[in-house]
Image: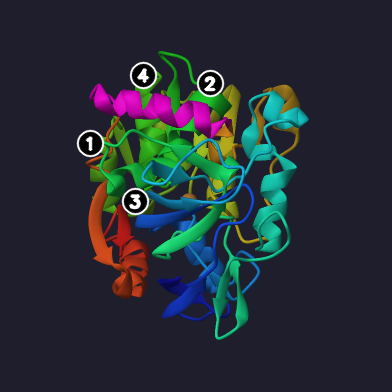
Amino acid sequence: MKSRAAVLFGAGQKLEIREVDVQDPGVGEVRIQMAAGGVCHSDLHVMKGDLKAPLPAILGHEGAGIVADVGAGVTDVKSGDHVIPLWRLSCGECEYCSAGRAALCAAGTEIRWSGRLLDGTTRFKLDGQEIKHFAGVSSFSNYTVVPEKAVLKIPDDIPLERAALLGCAVITGVGAVINAAEVRPGRTVAVFGTGGVGVNVVQGAALAGAEKIIAVDLMESRLEQAKSFGATHAVNASDGDPVEQIRDITGGRGVDYSFEVVGLPLTMRQAYDCLAKRGVAMLVGITPTTAEVSIPSLSLVYEERVLTGSLYGSTAPKIEIPRLIDLYRAGNLKLDELLTRTYPIEEINQAYSDLESGATLRSVVTF
Ligand code: CU
């Protein structure tokens, strides 16, 4: 079938809206009619060439839609089901999947770097040429084909534009706090970068009962937003060294946990420098492929500090996302406030420049 899609032909280019051919779902695959695709920073990294991906590809790794049809052998979902595609495919059987760390499954790595589905082919074509999948999702297409194991059925009554955000921004941010850092009540937290994922780190820290939640950003509007998601303090890094500002707020001690949601070596170093003894710096932001970070190694020993990272909420999304939906229903998870704008797919490049300028917090494109 034909589908309108946003295709990236090469790094450094804009997305182009094209009518692509979407083939039937193969064995164990699901064809989804996307209702909304999330405008996330990771796709922007690919567009700029900071993050490698096989091209040309249909980007988008966050979204929600309705199952159009399914291939042979599919039992988890049927046509008409509301679903979220997951950008880390997990086999369900390996060492990491068995330990509840589905994001670390090798199957997800394979599909991410090959740009193809599990049988080594793609379901997209343009003028007879193969178009790659992105992270096995390609949510910037009205129709996409995804492996059954990367599809999560959700309740019909959650608006799809909001549900879309659960598939990346919310689970990545909240999961980094709850599953990776395991923030405990009464502790202090600093969050570097309070965009779409960062505010979810903030609300995760609030859910975990952190006492001080210090939002760090360069944009005043972002800091204001962070407060509405539960930040108790705001540090504008353009007012001076954020590490010193954080030490001032914590009486010189530093924070128990810091989260870096920017993806820059500078802010990663700051996230490490603002820690208290035994503090944990959790890297969540995606850096360019070649980036490195250096830290004073002695503090790892003398202060027992920890520097680590979290991928996709460090969890099994099929277990965690339904819990997040329950939290949303109970009024404890802010999802409506997260979605600040909706664009038609034709305006996707505008959506990305608005993301970059900070005009939007999280937006989706619709079809
Ligand atoms: Cu994302």
Whether residue 36 can be seen here:
no
Whether label 2 lies within 8 Å of ligand 1 gets the answer: no
Give me the C-alpha separation between circle 2 and circle 4. Answer: 14 Å
Identity of the residue drawn at 29% across and 29% down: 328
Say the numbered circle drawn on residue 182: 2
Residue type, mark 4 in image: Glu
Could you say where residue 333 lies in the image, as x and y percent from the top left? 30, 29
Sequence-earlier tag: 1 or 4: 4
Q: Around disc 2, counting alpha carbons within 10 Å, would you say few (fewer than 14), some (14 to 19), or many (20 or more)? A: few
Sequence-earlier tag: 2 or 1: 2
Residue type, mark 1 in image: Ser
Above or below residue 185? Residue 316 is below
| Furthest residue toward top | 185
Whether label 4 lies within 8 Å of ligand 1 gets the answer: no
Q: What residue does disc 1 label?
A: 228
| Secondary element at image label 4 | loop
Foreground residue, 320 or 239?
320
Above or below residue 207? Residue 293 is below
The answer to whether the residue labelled 2 contacts the one labelled 4, judged by CB atoms less than 8 Å apart, is no
Q: What residue does disc 4 label?
A: 211
Could you say where residue 329 lies in the image, as x and y percent from the top left? 26, 26
